Amino acid sequence: MPMHFLTLMDFDKTTLRALLRRAMELKAMQHAGKDHAYFPRRIMGMIFDKSSTRTRVSFETAMAQFGGHAIFLSPRDTQLGRGEPIEDSARVLSRMVDIIMIRTYDHANIERFAEYSRVPVINALTDKYHPCQLLADIQTYIEHRGEIAGRTVAWIGDGNNMCHSYIEAARQFDFHLHIATPAGYEPDADIVKAAGSHVSLLRDPREAVRGSDLVVTDVWASMGQEDEQEKRIKSFRNYQVTSELMAQANPDALFMHCLPAHRGEEVSAEVIDASGSVVWEEAENRLHSQKALIEYLLPHK
Ligand code: CP
Ligand code: NVA
């Protein structure tokens, strides 16, 4: 049975920490121009049912810098998009490529794919989770502020896939997560329950941000929710991360956003473009942390 990375709970705490340390080493190597072509001729299959800039480019670049190759597969051009069963696609693709990443809608579909795959499967975002983004976010926090254990993180906005992965990160990296959402947009109750005292569910963004070391938000309408955009703009109007809201956080608090961002909706231009915002480093770290992930899942031959 191959190892998969479908949620942050698939690895233990020690593995996750080691992975981030390795991500920092790989980053230093990359910045120093040191060759790290550890996976010549290895192939990654990349299945995208949704749009992407960062995820596609980071995985494809990672495989190229490792000396391997990546194949971009969209539903428009594959038989998956014409209804070939997930089980059959998993069996066929995993006899050809060495590792597979999938960005799709229903989380159950990636679980089904992984069950029938002979090679490791990476969750590159589903409606429920975005674990790869959390590797980059935690790496970024540690690089700027040191250990995240014992810190307080504020999640402002939608209880979405990113929020769910933040809840799991709170468990795995031992920080406290304050979540402020409008009524009706709370995260999944089972995911919250499993996190116990790591998570506090709140309504008031100011209360959530008070005393926090990191403030995080995300779009109000995720991919697949485009037709709810207007309704959501109204429901979330008091949840914009502004300078006034950031002023409630600890003085050296960082701001993160997985991107793409909508300035003037979930975050003001002033906050995302200010010095406490580390969104560009966060985006860059997708490359380095995913290299560490690939390396862990795909041992050197
Ligand atoms: N943050 C993130 O996953 O970005 P993309 O949608 O551009 O891949
Ligand atoms: N919550 C967003 C994240 C995009 C990277 C979405 O699912 O569209």
Image (tube, helix red, strand yellow):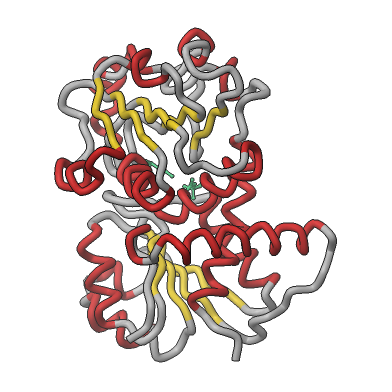
User: Which residue is the extreme one toward the top?
Assistant: 244
| Coordinates of residue 152 in the picture (x, y in percent) | 43, 31
Q: Residue at x 23, y 37 (%)?
A: 187
Q: Which quarter of the figure has residue 82?
A: bottom left
| Coordinates of residue 57 in the picture (x, y in percent) | 59, 57
Q: Which of 179 and 54 is in front in this view?
A: 179
Q: Which residue is drawn at 32% across and 33% down?
A: 221
Residue 184 in the image: above or below residue 226: above
Q: Residue at x 38, y 30 (%)?
A: 155
Residue 265 in the image: above or below residue 214: above
Q: Which quarter of the figure has residue 144?
A: top right
Relative horizontal placement of residue 13, taking residue 86 as reference (left or right): right
| Coordinates of residue 271 in the picture (x, y in percent) | 57, 19
Residue 105 in the image: above or below residue 201: below
Where's ligand 2: which quadrant? top left
Q: Nearer the viewer, residue 193 or 185?
A: 193
| Coordinates of residue 159 in the picture (x, y in percent) | 27, 35
Q: In which quarter of the image is the C terminus?
A: bottom right
Residue 157 in the image: above or below residue 286: above
Q: Quadrant of the N terminus?
A: bottom left
Relative horizontal placement of residue 189, taking residue 2 as reference (left or right): left
